[in-house]
Image (spheres, grey):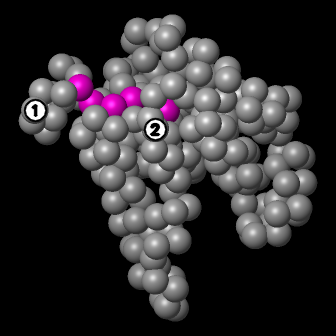
Amino acid sequence: MSDPAQGAAVRDGAPGGLIIFLNGTSSSGKSSIAVELLRILDEPFFHLPVDAFHAMRTRQEMAPERLATVLHRTWRGYHRAIAGMAAAGNNVVVDHVLSEEWRLRDCLDLFVPQDVVFVGVHCPRAELERRERERGDRPPGLAARQLAQVHTHGIYDIECDTSRAAPRDCARHIKDFLPHRPTPTAFQRLREKGDGR
């Protein structure tokens, strides 16, 4: 693996890809923003949603303790798939839920920090609950439970509130930000803090 301080690189010397990392609760609008980003970004990007990885898993019944292990391995594999795509020079849009502290630490260890645009996707609790009721495909209260942890690290490169801006407007805001990314990036600052918290 290349030294993160030197930037992402693959064996042929090509630079690594950019990771646009959307973090927010379930139903906050991450996937809708990702779809819009793929429509408007000038360079080719891949959308890697964590839901797609969970959907690939067998649907057999599992004991709760075994399911917890399988879910943990799924998240770890997902993070490594993102890192691998970026290391091969692919640009990636990620929609993620950092509802457990270890997930951010794992990403900080794996991703080249200067190649990550960390985006906070916010939405008020009442609107999250309304969306959950409307969708009907999420356990009631899931997003509200995630709110306590998802944004606790407190550092982003850019943020948006999907209760105030449509997904296309959020995507445009992110695209307009890309040429003006600051140094150090949010991931660099979080790494300097040591544990992402």
Of all residues shown, which one is farthest toward the bottom? 61
Q: Which residue is mark 2?
A: 45
Decide: few, some or many residues near mark 2? Use Cα within 10 Å; few <14, some 14-19, many ≥20: some
- Residue 111 in view, yes or no: no
Q: Secondary structure at mark 1?
A: loop
Rendered location of residue 68, percent (x, y): 46, 73
9 relative to 96, above or below:
above
Front-lying residue, 175 or 25: 175
Quadrant of res 149: top right
Earlier sequence position, callout 2 versus callout 1 = 1
Q: Which residue is mark 1?
A: 12
Report the span colored magenta: 15-20
Q: Could you give the CA–CA distance between mark 2 and mark 1, rounded to whole angstroms?
A: 20 Å
Q: Which mark is residue 66?
A: none
Left or right: where 127 falls relative to 157: right
Q: Is 178 in the magenta?
A: no
Decide: few, some or many residues near mark 1? Use Cα within 10 Å; few <14, some 14-19, many ≥20: few
Rendered location of residue 40, percent (x, y): 61, 30
Left or right: where 175 falls relative to 85: right
Rendered location of residue 152, percent (x, y): 59, 35
Rendered location of residue 23, percent (x, y): 58, 40
Q: Which three-letter amino acid code belongs to the residue tagged 1?
A: Asp
Location of the N terminus (image quadrant): top left
Q: Which three-letter amino acid code belongs to the residue tagged 2?
A: Phe
132 relative to 190, above or below:
below
